[in-house]
């Protein structure tokens, strides 16, 4: 069995922890976030020929990307970015977050989840935003931690990418 | 039977023989009959029985008795049969092991249980005896404790007599925090080696980040109640031991040794690790060798060699003094060198002297403290007489330090000096931009300030307020630009929020504008949609103006279907695009003072 470390990155309140909760059953309580700044969960995914044990490092969301604790990123086989589709600033900062992460650990597979897709009435992302992401080599999925839409797809896609490398 | 009837039968036969003896041939056979008839019959009977003995039926009837008889006599039979039996068993095991297993299973289980029970009993006995003999008073106290707390005596003994026990060992890949191997004492069950390994790595990172230790330094020991976590770090892997009780210092050496061996033997596997821990299964015996359990009764006395230790210490002190003397002069020279290289410090005179060294020179107020530098290089700075004249250094690192003290840039901003021009890059808030443009050229050594690489950062409270406004939208009916009854309520809320935002922005030297984007769904021609969306935007601008928002702070644009909001569902996408939406933009408020009044 192969093990891979995945880091979840995104601003405060984008729903990283909720996405993980939708995807796995958590062992550690959320209070690890406020103390150590990271919470780790495990999920086994069965890809066509391999079983991958994903270790999901859920970094505490910050208000400012400057506070990204890059030492936790070390050794990641993949990065899972999360933005909140109802808050433009969380989308705007994706590019800077990716730059900081790559500066720290180099180029690894990544995906972005545009989360809270269930809140259609508050959704602010427009065609232009999707185009900008696609043009900039992002693999994106709209997800809802509430309904579960897109969540498995995002994690499985990233797991498969980490194996392909 | 024939013998019982013998006398009667023979006299009768003789009479018959005589009576019928008329011919010679007949006479002879009668005579033979007469003489040896009985013996002949006995002979025939014997012959029959010997022949019968050679058939399996007869042997089968006799064999059990024969074996029993022989076994009772001596051991020859057993000795003779044993090679045959050995061969037979091994043949049977090879041909059908299942059957043998089933046959002996009922014996093996109880036998193992009995063996374990006996060993355990022996262990507890030894323990009991050791404790009762050497520490009888303590033994008594523990018995009382066991009796009072209702805990079995053996457990109380182990609790008190335990010096230390290595409960678990984790071999962790250093970079990823993934577990390579995990071993634990048999009676412990722990299934979350991967999570624990990850958290251990995270905690180590957290501590080195928090206390700004170098990347090579790191948390080596931490204690939780009676449990100590020891972490030894190698270049590629960490070895963490979970220890209950007081481990000796030698144990850490052993951990280090084990980790070194693993680095040596598994160098390639460690370098090429890609998440597959299989090649590290071979480290299990190495790790298991470290799973110690040490009780007080196992420990040797420590009285020996006290004298030797004292001698050793004396010798070490002498050697240390000699080394210190040599080092001290080297250290002084190195310290002077480091001061000379330090920007903002000019060393004019240095004299080591016999007791109190003397230093004289010039120092920029922002340069590093030379006394601290001395102390860092291991010189006792309290004994140094130093005189430093202040001066202004134009060394670029000092100029940047000076700029930092005066301009107080946010952590997100980098300052760099190129041809006496200060280049700023990164993000900064508006008030800093205003202040720095005013102050920069007054800094000695700075002739200009270049802010072209700085992006404006917006404080969280403004950004949150902007987000709230941007989440609102005014919806329209199909093909219509007429404001619905609810539109006025939404517009009033937006106006209130925007006024509040303007207030906060002004205070922080930002200038916020509200852009209104008119939108349409995709039905209808592009041209119709463009006109309709412009009309929608215009109507909302007018509505907001009537609610007191100054028109020069707003712009209304009809974007038609060019940049639609995209939700997951086509029906709601169409609905939310028949709308006017809001975008807040921030600029630094260069004429801020005017607007505030």
Image: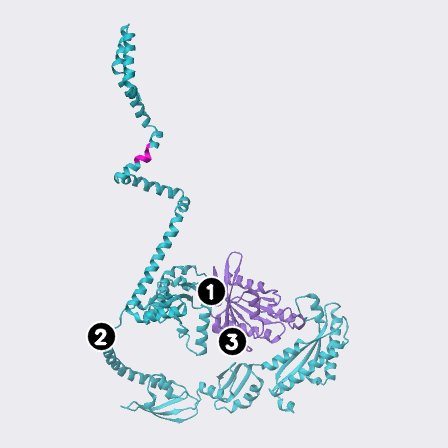
Chain colours: A purple, B cyan
Q: Is B64 covered by the magenta stretch?
A: yes
Residue A52 position in % (x across, y down): 50, 61
Judge whether B30 appears above or below B487 on screen: above
In primary-sequence order, the first of circles 1 and 2 is: 1
Residue B113 seen from this side: yes
Judge whether B435 appears above or below B256 on screen: below
Quarter where residue B216 is shown: bottom left
Q: Name the quarter where the C terminus of chain B is drawn.
A: bottom right
Residue B455 position in % (x across, y down): 57, 80
Q: Magenta region: which residues?
A: B62-66
Image check: B458 left or right of B272? right
In space, the residues marked 1 and 2 are separated at their CA atoms by 48 Å
Q: Name the residue under label 1.
A: B192
Residue B557 position in % (x across, y down): 71, 77
Tell me which chain the residue with mark 3 is part of: A
Count of labels in the image: 3
SS for callout 2: helix
Residue found at x 46% / y 71% = B202
Q: Mark 2 points at which residue?
A: B308
**Quick one: label 3, few (<14), some, or many (20+) residues within 10 Å?**
few
Q: Main secondary structure of the magenta part?
A: helix
Quarter where residue B484 is shown: bottom right
Judge whether B351 appears above or below B47 on screen: below
């Amino acid at each position: 069995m192969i093990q891979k470390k995945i880091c979840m990155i995104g601003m405060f309140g984008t729903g990283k922890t909720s996405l993980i909760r939708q995807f796995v059953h958590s062992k550690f309580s959320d209070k690890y976030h406020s103390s150590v700044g990271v919470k780790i969960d495990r999920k086994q995914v069965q890809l066509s020929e391999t079983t991958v044990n994903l270790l999901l490092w859920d970094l505490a969301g910050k208000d400012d990307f400057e506070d990204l604790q890059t030492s936790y990123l070390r050794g990641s086989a993949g990065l899972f970015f999360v933005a909140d589709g109802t808050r433009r600033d969380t989308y705007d900062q994706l590019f800077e977050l990716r730059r900081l992460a790559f500066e720290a650990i180099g180029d690894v597979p990544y995906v972005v989840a545009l989360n809270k897709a269930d809140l259609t009435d508050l959704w602010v992302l427009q065609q232009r935003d999707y185009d900008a992401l696609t043009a900039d080599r992002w693999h994106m999925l709209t997800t809802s931690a509430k309904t579960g839409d897109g969540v498995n797809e995002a994690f499985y896609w990233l797991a498969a990418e980490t194996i392909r490398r | 039977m024939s013998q019982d009837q013998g006398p009667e039968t023979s006299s009768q036969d003789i009479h018959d023989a005589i009576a019928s003896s008329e011919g010679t041939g007949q006479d002879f056979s009668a005579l033979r009959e007469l003489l040896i008839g009985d013996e002949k019959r006995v002979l025939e009977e014997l012959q029959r029985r010997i022949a019968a003995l050679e058939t399996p039926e007869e042997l089968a009837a006799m064999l059990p008795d024969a074996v029993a008889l022989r076994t009772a006599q001596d051991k020859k039979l057993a000795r003779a049969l044993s090679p045959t039996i050995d061969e037979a068993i091994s043949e049977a095991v090879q041909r059908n092991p299942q059957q043998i297993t089933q046959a002996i299973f009922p014996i093996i289980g109880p036998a193992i249980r009995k063996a374990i029970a006996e060993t355990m009993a022996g262990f507890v006995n030894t323990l009991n005896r050791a404790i009762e003999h050497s520490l009888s008073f303590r033994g008594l106290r523990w018995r009382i404790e066991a009796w009072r707390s209702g805990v079995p005596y053996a457990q109380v003994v182990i609790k008190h007599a335990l010096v230390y026990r290595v409960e678990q060992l984790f071999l962790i890949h250093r970079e990823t925090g993934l577990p390579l191997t995990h071993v634990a004492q048999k009676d412990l069950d722990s299934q979350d080696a991967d999570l624990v390994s990850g958290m251990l790595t995270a905690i180590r990172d957290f501590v080195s980040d928090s206390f700004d230790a170098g990347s090579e330094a790191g948390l080596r020991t931490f204690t939780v109640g009676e449990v100590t976590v020891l972490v030894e770090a190698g270049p590629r892997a960490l070895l963490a031991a979970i220890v209950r009780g007081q481990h000796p210092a030698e144990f850490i050496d052993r951990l280090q040794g084990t980790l070194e061996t693993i680095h040596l033997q598994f160098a390639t596997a460690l370098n090429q690790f890609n998440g597959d821990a299989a090649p590290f299964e071979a480290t299990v015996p190495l790790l298991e060798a470290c799973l110690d359990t040490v009780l007080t009764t196992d420990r040797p006395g420590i009285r020996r060699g006290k004298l030797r230790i004292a001698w050793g210490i004396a010798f070490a002190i002498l050697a240390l003094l000699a080394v210190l003397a040599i080092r001290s002069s080297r250290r002084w020279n190195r310290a002077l060198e480091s001061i000379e290289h330090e920007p903002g410090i000019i060393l004019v005179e240095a004299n080591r002297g016999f007791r109190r060294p003397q230093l004289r020179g010039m120092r920029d107020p922002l340069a590093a403290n030379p006394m601290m530098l001395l102390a860092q290089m291991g010189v006792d700075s309290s004994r140094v007489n130093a005189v430093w004249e202040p001066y202004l250094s134009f060394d670029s690192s000092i100029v940047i330090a000076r700029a930092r003290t005066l301009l107080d840039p946010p952590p997100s901003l980098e300052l760099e000096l190129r041809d006496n021009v200060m280049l700023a890059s990164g993000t900064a808030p508006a008030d800093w931009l205003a202040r720095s443009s005013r102050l920069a050229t007054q800094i000695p050594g700075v002739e200009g300030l270049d802010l072209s690489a700085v992006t404006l950062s917006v404080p969280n409270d403004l950004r949150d307020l902007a987000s709230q406004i941007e989440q609102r939208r005014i919806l329209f009916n199909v093909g219509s630009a007429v404001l619905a009854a609810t539109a006025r309520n939404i517009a009033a809320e937006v106006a209130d929020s925007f006024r509040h935002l303007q207030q906060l922005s002004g205070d922080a030297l930002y200038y916020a504008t509200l852009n209104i984007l008119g939108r349409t769904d995709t039905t209808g021609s592009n041209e119709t949609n463009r006109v309709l969306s412009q009309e929608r935007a215009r109507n909302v601008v007018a509505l907001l103006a009537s609610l007191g928002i100054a028109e020069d702070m707003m712009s209304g644009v009809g974007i038609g279907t060019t940049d639609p909001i995209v939700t997951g569902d086509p029906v709601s996408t169409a609905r939310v695009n028949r709308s006017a939406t809001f975008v807040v933009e921030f600029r630094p408020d260069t004429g801020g003072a005017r607007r505030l009044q």
